[in-house]
Image (cartoon, rainbow, N blue to C red):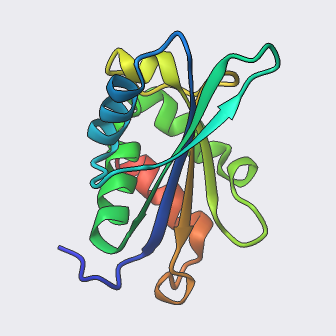
Amino acid sequence: MYLMRGPVQSVDVSFFVHATEDSGRVEAKVAQSLGLEGPPEVEKLEGHFGNPIESVSFHATGELALRAYRRLVEGFPESLRRRLADEISMHVDEHQSLYIRLDKQALMEGRFALGSSDTVRVKVKPRLYSLGGGAINFYREALKDG
């Protein structure tokens, strides 16, 4: 078990909830899938045609962040974990943060899949000084080990 100063500093999760969706159900499913706790931050927005949209975000640190990261990695099917491990540099920015877009509809069905529209955006910020081999190697190894 990692202490508070584990390899993951924080995990940020954000998504939009449209007027046709049950915001409580979507928030609960995302939180449950990634092991997030506490109420999310919710911002009320208005769509192009005046329809209500909510911008929902969760921020986890310490053990909660590490748990969310583990759930993310373990939730992917093995074939997708291998593909992500091979393409990991495409998902990491200059600050070594990992960015993944999950398909929100698949997540609502209990599956982890990558998405390109109507996504749940996940940002994993590593604690760089605790990763001797670097963040990319840390992400790659976690994906390979599942």
Is 85 placed above or below 27 here?
A: below
- Judge left or right: residue 121 versus residue 35: right
Question: Where residue 126 appears, x then y in whole percent?
Answer: 53, 72
Q: Quadrant of residue 112?
A: top left
At x 24% / y 77%, what residue is drawn?
2
Q: Residue furthest right?
A: 48
> Is 45 on the left or on the right of 114, as rendered?
right
Between 66 and 14, the residue placed more toward the observer is: 14
From the viewer's perspective, tell me whether residue 96 is left or right of residue 130.
right
The image position of residue 41, as x and y in percent, is 48, 52
Direction bottom: furthest residue: 129
Q: Work out whether 10 lies above or below 6.
A: above
Judged from this view, the residue extending furthest toward the top is 20
Question: What residue appears at the point 68 percent right and 44 percent down from the top-left corner?
Answer: 87
Left or right position of 75 against 59: left
Across and down, in percent, residue 17 comes to 54, 26
Expressed as whole percent of the image width and height from the top left, the position of residue 76 reads 41, 33
5 w.r.t. 107: above or below:
below
Position of the N terminus by quadrant = bottom left
Residue at x-position 33% and y-position 24%: 25
Residue toward you, 121 or 3: 121
Q: How many discs mark residues in the rendered view?
A: 0
Residue lying furthest left in this view? 1
